Amino acid sequence: MIDSTVVDLSRLQFAATAMYHFIFVPLTLGLSWILVIMESVYVMTGKPIYKEMTQFWGKLFGINFALGVTTGITMEFQFGTNWAYYSHYVGDIFGAPLAIEGLMAFFLESTMFGLFFFGWNRLSKRGHLAVTTLMALGTNLSAVLILIANAWMQDPVGSAFNPITMRMELTNFAALVLNPVAQSKFVHTVASGYVTGSLFVLGISAWYLLKDSHVEFARRSFRIAAAFGIAGTLSVIVLGDESGYAVSESQKSKLAAIEAMWETEPAPAGFNIVAWPNEEKQANDWEIKVPFMLGLIATRSTSQVLPGIHEIRAKNKERIASGVQAIIALEDMRKNPADKAAQEKFKKHEADMGYGLLVKRHVDDVRQATPEVIAKAAMDSVPKVAPLFWSFRIMVGLGFLMLGLFVAAIWLSIYNTHRQHPLLMKAFLWSIPAPWIAIMCGWLVAEYGRQPWTVFGMLPTHLSASSLSPASLWGSIAGFMAFYTLLLIVEMYLMFKYARLGPTAVQSNHA
Amino acid sequence: MFDYATLKLIWWLLVGVLLIGFAIMDGHDMGVGVLLQVIGKDDTERRVMINTIAPHWDGNQVWFITAGGAVFAAWPFVYATAFSGLYWALLLVLFALFFRPVGFEYRSKLPDPTWRKSWDWGLFAGSAVPALVFGVAFGNLFLGVPFRLDDTMRSFYSGSFWALLNPFALLFGVVSLSLLTLQGATFLSHRTEGDLQARAKKAAQILAIVLLAAFSLGGLCVSRIDGYVIQSIGDIGGSLNPLMKEVGRAPGAWFANYAKYPVLWLIPALAYLGGIIVLVTIRAGLTLLAFVGSSLACVSVILTAGVALFPFVLPSSEMPKASLTAWDATSSHVTLNVMLWVALIFTPIVVAYTGWAYRVMAGKVTRDFIVKNDKTVY
């Protein structure tokens, strides 16, 4: 039997390193376009202050980018080191977008990253702007590809099981790339990065304005950030809604858990604004509900029924029982490839095979899967409600808060009344972490909400990990923690130092 | 669409191309990192060295990342088995690599000498450790790695990290370390001037000799151990899993490909030629040609090892039939085909803009340049 400690520690390590990586990614996504905007204004107007802005914010961009690259190295290899069975089982499909990401996006952004910093005196104005634009394009392209990969884990399309190689194999590349889940996820995710970058520039600029230093520089930066930020926030919200709609199609268990909807309600279902989900009772202790709203948002219809957690589990129980038969048939086929009866049985139950694998958490041999074991497996087939319920609400709440902030920022920028509203200006500064919190909550919803699967309906998480020892995992977790903490301290120190220095940090470059 | 067996062979070559691309491009960055404190006598000299690669290290590092991604896409069995089995070796490489992006980017952001000295050591570790471990890993491939597969294709590794550090494999580590450092030395000879350049040239001469000696000794050692041979295998033009073959061990088997196709001996011969080109041209001041010579050595040293192992990619000492080969560790026909097109379209584009970036940044980096641009260069 697979050691569940190893699985839990592997999950902890992956979650920690991925979330750490995602501290730096959104800022890169957002700042890269802000640099393009600033430099475009410089090329169009010829005003040196915009070059100074590009170079100063570029400096902070570079400090952040270095750690994004560092922690990204881990991500490219960690599927192999810690999720070997996952890598074997779905690498035929999942590996492709990762490799394409390297060839198409990483090379582009990284090559242009170097020229962005060192090419100022060697490239024409337009040439340098082209470099900056290609760098931004590269960072965003990498997001497209990684979200295609992630969307496939959420909603696996275009693949089929090969009993010879014992894995899933790609059957339709176009379906993988054009997965609708990937499209809404991509815009939602990159736009959250645009918000992060905007609020970062907005907050720091507000601080300069509060101190009355670098006023012209800060006012202009503030305006660009406010405009880009409001566009970003609106995209995040609209596409967040689209993502929710996509989830309601592909992962009903995630939606039910986010909404703490235990029982199936008549359509359109009500929406729990706040509730107190109780895992033991399998019900909410109390709830404040808006009638009809969830059904309307999630299905965009008044007649489509959304299943509650209890109903989902009951259906999963049937699929698990059927999936067990698929695995038994597969074992028979391996013993005797000519066994016609086994082949037919496999065909009949193949679609449920992933569900059958869920029992392997409780028994090694699926033939030992008694109805009790199947019931247990069905019980774990829906994630825990409270973490999803709350992180979703924090994410959405912060999203609307940021929308309010950017509307206010636009207002101040238009009427040029920064000085009259010092409290608001402080609010911009102190809100800099808000997008990060929202983003982490969002990833928790996406990834924890997919449990107990790594690939939804196909491969359970507890089968996906490498066969490592707990000692190895404790060692590597300690190593990552030590390195990453040290690097974060260094990064934050430099970030604060250069943000405090302000545009003077790049002024020797004027020659 | 190519037939499946041809695609499997093409992908063996393409993974080789990526490894070679890594050795040539990221290799010279790592070489600079290794030599940083050996030939850089003061802070300004070290900054000169770092700034020869400053605009390029990040793009070059992507060869490594993309090689990882390509192995995932083309050889998922290898990606899964090798990286989880050689867990600590890979983590060691990753941890060492962490020092590079931050080292380059942060080192000159503060003037404090202790700060800079610390990053010098970080850059050294981030360059030397991966360069060494890659060779050690190759050495262990020749010996076979202790892993087995169960009938659901889950892999189990039974060796330890320390067993990887045997003298045989360490010799291969010397080969890869000297190879990549040589690559850095010839690059520095081309892009610096004065005393620093003289020291870089001297280092290149020493490293070329060390490389050729270690390479020869490595070949001799490989001839003394048992290699792996496929005794029987299913249809290589169809779907296979690694357990569908029989594998045996035989003395001198790692030279079987060379015995069968003697023309392949040209490949190791080119490695010597590369080394000799370095030795001849560097004295004559033909530094660009010296860099071409060390790059030729990168190509041929890696191909020499790859051809010897072919079609094995990851031989298993514990369960020889589970050895992963270019025939049975690959992705499906569809994936190999799609990825071939992606590679054929994007690799030339990458090479083109990388070449352009080098042209934009061409020329020697001088002490004067560093002093003048103190705040904006690395």
Image: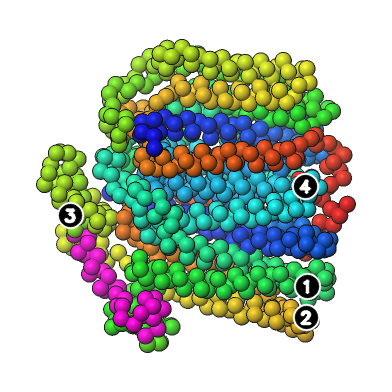
In the picture as drawn, the residue positioned furthest to the front comes out as: B1
Mark 2 residue type: Asn
- Residue under the image location 26 percent in, 40 percent down: A164
Whole-percent x, y for residue B85 in the image = 41, 38
Would you name the residue on which mark 1 appears?
A: A219
Distance from the alpha carbon under mark 4 to that under mark 3: 63 Å
First-in-chain label (4 vs 1): 4
The earlier-in-sequence mark between 4 and 3 is: 4
In primary-sequence order, the first of circles 2 and 4 is: 4
Q: Amino acid at mark 1?
A: Arg
**Marks 4 and 3 in Cβ contact (< 8 Å):** no
Magenta residue check for A312 = yes
B52 or A423, nearer to the observer: B52
Do labels 1 and 2 touch, CB within 8 Å? yes
Are there few (<14), some (14-19), or many (20+) residues within 10 Å of tag 1?
Answer: some
Labels 4 and 3 share a subunit:
yes
Which residue shows up at 15% across the image and 49% down it? A344
Give the magenta part as a residue range: A292-321
Label drawn at residue A348 = 3
* Dominant secondary structure (helix, strand or loop) of the stretch shown in magenta: helix
Distance CA(mark 2)–CA(mark 4)? 36 Å
Q: Chain of mark 3?
A: A
The residue carrying mark 2 is A416
